[in-house]
Image: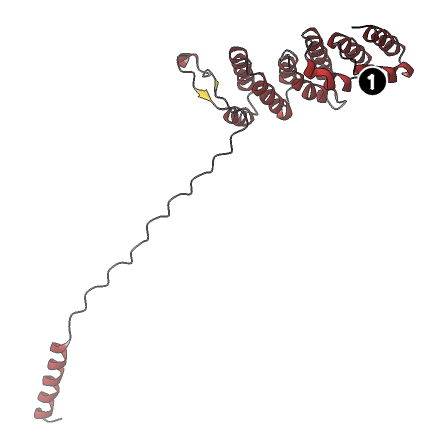
Amino acid sequence: MSGKFFFTVLVVIGLVGCGKKDTPPASPPTTPPPAAPKSRVAPPPLPMDEPVAVPPSAPAHAAASPNISATEILQRYQSHWNDPDERGRLIDAVALHAMETDNKMQAIRLFTEMLRVETSPELKMTLLDELGSSEHPAALAPILARLSPNEPEEVREAALNAAETLVSMLGFEKNKDAFEPVVALLDPRYPTSLRELAISTLEDLEDKRAIPHLQRLLSDPDEVVRTAAREAIDWLQHEE
């Protein structure tokens, strides 16, 4: 290779190198901002969702008694499935609220839902006692459901006592809304003591619509029921 040719090659390489532009370093890829967390949709409020004052479990904070909704009460009740003391405290809070506000229907609804999920026989008995003292016919259905043979004996006994307490109150107060629920208690599947009490309560209600229902009991196989029905019919037929 001649010196002239070597010189020419160097000049060409130098010119090509001078003509290149410095390439700026590639910028690091931009990371997109994290997506905003989806907001949790609150459960729809239950009917008559009136706030209930629930005292805190810690005595040191007794001054703070937040009002929480009925929906939150049920959520808290179910979340404390392994803490019967906390569930008992919530039952007491609902009972106190019902007594202070006379909002019996909300208390009955809450007690019914609590009873539906409760597994402790002791707390079932507490809830049945609260329902039995509610003085409202709407409490009768959840009480009667606990007469099921699937329930422990002590729960069935508590349900029978609660039903009898409630029916007696309804008759004493002559609650006209109690007519249909009490008539349903004439069914032979219920204990004799409850059927006999239902007959007596129909007398107290002084509603002659009860007579056809009582007449069907005149052929009942239970003598106690037949006698009570006959006496109630005589009384209602002569009632002015």
Q: How crowded is the residue under tag 1: few (<14 C-alpha within 10 Å), some, or many (20+)?
A: some
Q: How many marks?
A: 1
- Secondary structure of the residue carrying numbered label 1: helix
Q: Where the C terminus falls, by quadrant?
A: top right
Q: Where the N terminus falls, by quadrant?
A: bottom left
Compared across the picture, whether 126 is left or right of 56 comes to right
Residue 111, percent across and down?
60, 20
Residue that appears at 67% across and 7% down: 173
Residue that appears at 62% across and 26% down: 117
Residue 65 seen: yes
Q: Nearer the viewer, residue 82 or 227?
A: 227
Residue 178, percent across and down?
70, 16
- Residue 136: name its quadrant: top right
Residue that appears at 59% across and 19% down: 105
Q: Nearer the viewer, residue 20 or 89?
A: 89
Name the residue tied to disc 1.
Answer: 213
Q: Amino acid at mark 1?
A: His
12 versus 137 height, above or below: below
